[in-house]
Image (cartoon, rainbow, N blue to C red):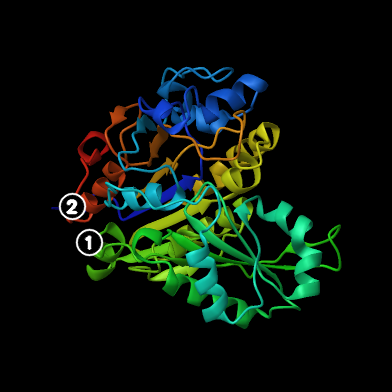
Amino acid sequence: MTQRFGRICLVVLDSAGIGEMPDAADWGDAGADTLGHILERRKVVLPNLQSLGLGNITPLAGLAAVDAPIGSFGKCTLKSDGKDTTTGHWEMAGIILKQGFPTFPQGFPDRIIDRFVAEANVPGVLGNIPASGTEIIKQLGEEHVATGKPIVYTSADSVFQIAAHEEVIPIDRLYEICEIARNILHGDDEVARVIARPFLGSNSADFKRTENRHDYAVPPPTDNLLPLLANAGLDVVCIGKIASIYDSLGVTEELVGKNNDQAVDSTIEALNAESRGLIFSNLVDFDMLYGHRRDPEGYARALEEFDLRLPEIMSAMKDNDLLILSADHGNDPTKEGSDHTREYVPLLVYGREAHAGVALGTRQSLSDIGQTIAENFGLRIADGVSFLGEIA
């Protein structure tokens, strides 16, 4: 097959769901609608996303459908058993999970914590509850400094997180105990990620997480999009937390993206460089700062800020580049709790040499994105239905 686009840039607006899926009630998410509920709160100014066709996907308050969108538009179903970061991203690459990663809403059982304390040789742990990372260091940070006990916590995601003050448990030691936890958490306890969460500060009023976070992910199956591309001699440039989600499997270059602006900067940097293959970015702030913290106004501002920067990404694209915008799950900031929400995710596709205004409908899996990328380069992943023929 002749390659139709020289590069494909896939940008994930982390958690930007676009309405409940049919099984949302089974997950406790009846009525969830991340983008819909944010746009109902106030007028959210998104002219560039609107021009691509965001308002054409489904009715959105204050964001009308346009007669001639410059992009193609649709939405994707999360087919896997789950609604978390790893599940959504893995499905994009062709991995559909029939059984989701385990979560621990009551904290980790003694058999895990006792083994961790013994093997990591720590004086015990603090926390062991689902919590916001910023809040738990305020609550337990001073006790951690006094006792040397690491703070262990989880969330609605399948994660085992370890927070520690960098002057109490140095970075290398924190990474070491995270690796020990990763080695413990297998079988029925195999969480998707173990995460090192270092922080600094003198007291609870000024404790602040640093940028030395490190993720230890479950390695994905090898027959996914990223190693398929890399093994074919193509570039796989990953930005933000993408590389960690895939345990760096198939990643040929990693660029920093610890927040939305930094991820956009790195995406533009990658587009300006010479490459052939995939540029894969994650914009984490939507989920981390505003979805989990139930901040619809912050989420709205972040959407507007991204919309303002979207023309920079489009301008950096070469004529035969393709841009795909999507999300990995929902995280409706108007709902109770702090959990992700089981939602469809938007699908927007743009390229100067791509067809415009194509209604891509409701895709039956996020793996359609991965299959489309694979087919563009004459390859095939195990699952997914390409929409390449509709847009090229």
Q: Amino acid at mark 2?
A: Ala
Q: Are marks 2 and 1 in contact (CB under 8 Å)?
A: yes
Q: Amino acid at mark 1?
A: Asp
Looking at the picture, tell me which residue is in the foreground, 243 or 117.
117
Task: Return the x and y of residue 136 as percentages of the image width and height.
Answer: 71, 55
Tell me the CA gap for discs 2 and 1.
7 Å
- Residue 86 appears in the picture as rendered: yes
Task: Return the x and y of residue 225 as percentages of the image width and height.
Answer: 28, 58
Q: Secondary structure at mark 2?
A: loop
Q: Secondary structure at mark 1?
A: loop
In this view, 326 is above or below 65: below
Does residue 41 appear to the left or right of 279 in the view shown?
right
Which quadrant: the C terminus?
top left
Task: Return the x and y of residue 166 as percentages of the image width and height.
Answer: 72, 75
Name the residue carrying label 1.
223
In this view, 208 is above or below 66: below
Measuring 55% from the left and 65% from the top, which residue is drawn there?
195
- Residue 240 appears in the picture as rendered: no
In this view, 93 is above or below 76: below
